[in-house]
Amino acid sequence: MSQRVNIQYSLRLDELAGEVKRLLDNTQLKLQELADVESISASRALSLETLRAITIQREGLAEVDHKLMDIMNIINGYISFHTNETYNTQREQLERDVSRDPTPAQTLEELRNNEITYQG
């Protein structure tokens, strides 16, 4: 099996779907190549040729598996990015709302202060 190396590169967010599609298409082509092998006759089944063919198939499937894992990681990162972005937006909105409107604890504290002022 050949060695693998991780790389990193950047692209615009609007290019990501096209890049993922390209990676998926390449993976599907590889799967099609693996599926298009000629069938082995019973007389050749127990041969070195068959063993080599199986080894090539397994290595090809491992390559496809690595590529699919890479694609999954890209999609998971994209979803995580949007989830965090949505969460941060919602949190910022909540913080703005809280700073404008008093929380129940602040209201209670104000009532206590007013009560002390009124009695005294």
Image (cartoon, grey):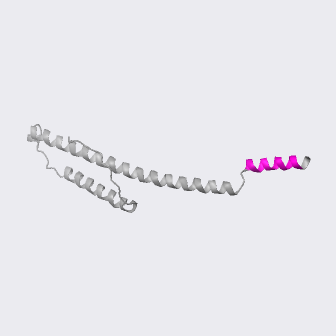
- Examine the structure image and report whether residue 113 is included in the region drawn in magenta: yes
Q: How many marks?
A: 0
Give the magenta range.
104-117
Horizontal and vertical percent for residue 41? 11, 44
Point out residue 90 in the picture as x, y percentages from the top left corner: 57, 55
| Residue 42 magenta | no
* Residue projecting furthest to the bottom: 14
- In the image, 36: left or right of 92? left
Instruction: Return the residue nearer the eye: 97 or 23.
Output: 97
Answer above or below: position of 38 versus 3.
below
Name the residue at 12% across, 40% down.
45
User: Which residue is rendered at x = 18% and y = 52% of the image?
Assistant: 36
Q: Which residue of the protein is positioned furthest toward the left in this rendering?
A: 43
Going 45% across and 53% down the picture, which residue do you hit?
81
Taking depth in this image into account, of 35 and 111 the one nearest to the observer is 111
Residue 77 in picture, x, y percent from top left: 41, 50
Give the residue furthest to the right. 120
Q: Residue at x 35, y 55 (%)?
A: 10
Work out which quarter of the rendered image holds the N terminus and state it.
top left
Please name the predominant secondary structure of the magenta segment in the image. Answer: helix
Left of 7 or right of it: where is 107?
Answer: right
Q: Quadrant of residue 43?
A: top left
Residue 100 coordinates in the image, percent (x, y):
69, 57
